[in-house]
Amino acid sequence: MNFKRILNICNFIIALILVVLLAGYFLFHPDGSVSQDEDSVLIGASYMTMNNELFAIINEQISHRVDAEGDHMVVRDPALDIDRQVEQIEDMLDMGIRVLILTPVDSDALSDVLRRARRQGVIVIVVDSNLSDSSLADCTIVSDNYRAGVLAGEYLLSKMEEGEKRNIVLLTHDAALSGVQRVKGFTDTVSGRKGIRIVREIPCEGKLELAVPRMESFIEEGILFDSVFCLNDPSCIGAAAALDSKGLLESVELYGVDASPDVKAMIRDGKIKGSVAQSPTKVGEQAADALYMLLRGQKVDPMILVPVELVTQENVEEHNVDRWQ
């Protein structure tokens, strides 16, 4: 191979490297934001965890609309870590997002970063779980979480015989206002009934991986109980696994919130008594509609409640076991 040919090859490699570097520059600005068309909008999303299919479906509905509008979306997963969520929102604000879609890990702990978002003129849309200070959001779109607890409580009461007693365990998540509202709806409904006793509240952050060992530990204490209300379906599945490991799944009634496909299958098979169905598809669609109405200067309701409905063995086949609502 002669020197001229070697030189041509080197020049080609250098040119190729320059093309790659230039492409990288135009794809990502020095501040780390995704390159956008001149008229496109950058939208950030931070759900409390992506380890729950419900949030993946909400995000899918929003991202479909964003793509159709020719805009861009950045999604971050704080994995139920509030410090990480604050840091990720700060990063997205630095990137120049115009809209923030948010499910707060902690209803109280995002005030400072959201005030910064408001100062920057960022539209804030909260989904699935409220902020304690609703004024920090332009629009909040949630399932009727209090009603979800009420429906589960009413169903439990309807199955009680005259003079029957119930010892109930609650699986809770006190940092998430949605979980607090569901538990409150349930306890407000059942607490006035004679024979009802709440024997323990077990915090589990709505996580299957926490619900299993904490429920097993409670069972080992030997406290009598016959019913469990869980703030969501991951914790309900965890409770079911713990009960099954101790041979108690057949004798304890389980109630959840979400009506995910896995739980609907367990309801059909008689392993879980009931779950209150949320519709992540509707929440996502409503969020996408609100997003573009607000961007276009149109008014939206500051609070949008998406209806919920109870799924039990009597009606589970009407709710498409293989899919979310």
Image (cartoon, rainbow, N blue to C red):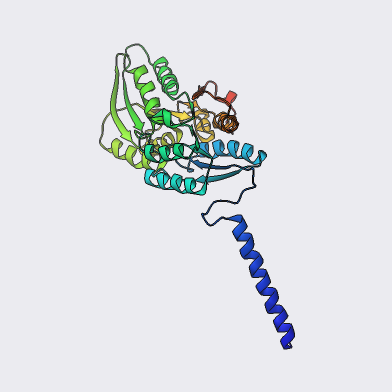
Q: What is the x, y in percent for residue 220? A: 28, 38
In the rendered structure, the answer to whether residue 305 lies left or right of residue 38 reads left
In the image, residue 9 sits, relative to residue 118, either above or below, namely: below
Q: Which quadrant holds the C terminus?
A: top right
Residue extending furthest toward the top: 162
* Quarter where residue 9 is shown: bottom right
Q: What is the x, y in percent for residue 241? A: 41, 39
Q: How many marks?
A: 0
Q: What is the x, y in percent for residue 275? A: 47, 27
Q: Which quadrant holds the N terminus?
A: bottom right
* Quarter where residue 299 is shown: top right
Identify which residue, 196 or 6, lies in the foreground: 6
Q: Residue at x 55, y 21 (%)?
A: 315
The answer to whether residue 251 shows anywhere in this view is no
Identify which residue, 10 or 273, lies in the foreground: 10
In the image, residue 133 sits, relative to residue 70, either above or below, namely: above
In the rendered structure, the answer to whether residue 79 lies left or right of residue 283 reads left
Q: What is the x, y in percent for residue 183? A: 37, 26
In the image, residue 121 sits, relative to residue 169, either above or below, namely: below
The answer to whether residue 201 shows anywhere in this view is yes
Identify which residue, 181 or 266, lies in the foreground: 181
Q: Residue at x 55, y 36 (%)?
A: 58
* Quarter where residue 176 is shown: top left
In the rendered structure, the answer to whether residue 202 lies left or right of residue 13 reads left
Residue extending furthest toward the bottom: 2
